[in-house]
Image (tube, grey):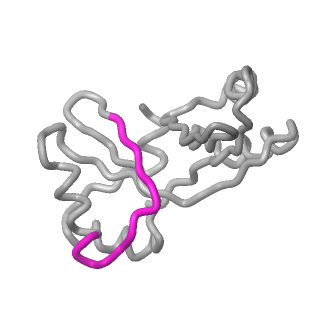
Amino acid sequence: MVIKQLSVFLENKTGRLMEVLSALGEEKINIKAITIADTSEFGILRILVSHPAEALSLLKARGFSVSLTDVLAIATPVEAGSFAKALRVLSDRNISIEYMYGFSIGEKAAIILCAEDIGKASAALKENGMELIPAEALNRL
């Protein structure tokens, strides 16, 4: 249930984010989730898109520094403590999380996470009854 995420290195300059989003829009590539981690000089844009391989080629062709990363999407109920329950599974197995972000739609929330060992994290979550969201399901949102 691994999902391919785009990571784009962006200079903190007016218009750079708009250039990425416009390029994707022109090619009818839908954004399913997005986050930016930044410093004063640069940012890392992380996005889940409908066609990651196409988006990677497109952005590279336009001169962006971009890569694909494996991440997991965990579905949880929209209720207090549900994120902690999912993360407890990983913590109890000493699986480190590199970063995460989330969003909610209706009665469900999604945690997107990158772990040091994505295979081990996926197996642990499945063994503990956690619902992993496949890429195809994200594309239907």
Direction from residue 43 to residue 36 in the image, left or right? left
- Residue at 39%, 70% in the rendered image: 96
- Residue at 73%, 21% in the rendered image: 15
Specify the quadrant of the image occupied by residue 89: bottom left
Is residue 104 on the magenta stretch?
A: no
Q: Residue furthest left?
A: 80
Direction from residue 87 to residue 61 in the image, left or right? right
Position of residue 65 relative to residue 129, above or below, is above
Direction from residue 83 to residue 67 in the image, left or right? right
Specify the quadrant of the image occupied by residue 29: top right
- x then y, percent, for residue 22: 72, 22
Position of residue 68 relative to residue 57, above or below, is below
Specify the quadrant of the image occupied by residue 61: top right
Specify start and end residues of the magenta stretch as a single range.
Answer: 91-103
Q: Nearer the viewer, residue 88 or 135?
A: 88
- x then y, percent, for residue 94: 31, 78
Is residue 93 on the magenta stretch?
A: yes
Position of residue 140 relative to residue 22, above or below, is below
**Image quadrant where one finds the N terminus:** bottom left
- x then y, percent, for residue 78: 18, 37
Picture mark count: 0
Is residue 48 in sight in this rendering?
no
Position of residue 46 relative to residue 2, above or below, is above
- x then y, percent, for residue 32: 50, 34
- Residue at 36%, 41% in the rendered image: 102
Is residue 139 in sight in this rendering?
yes
- Residue at 37%, 70% in the rendered image: 121
**Image quadrant where one finds the C terminus:** top left
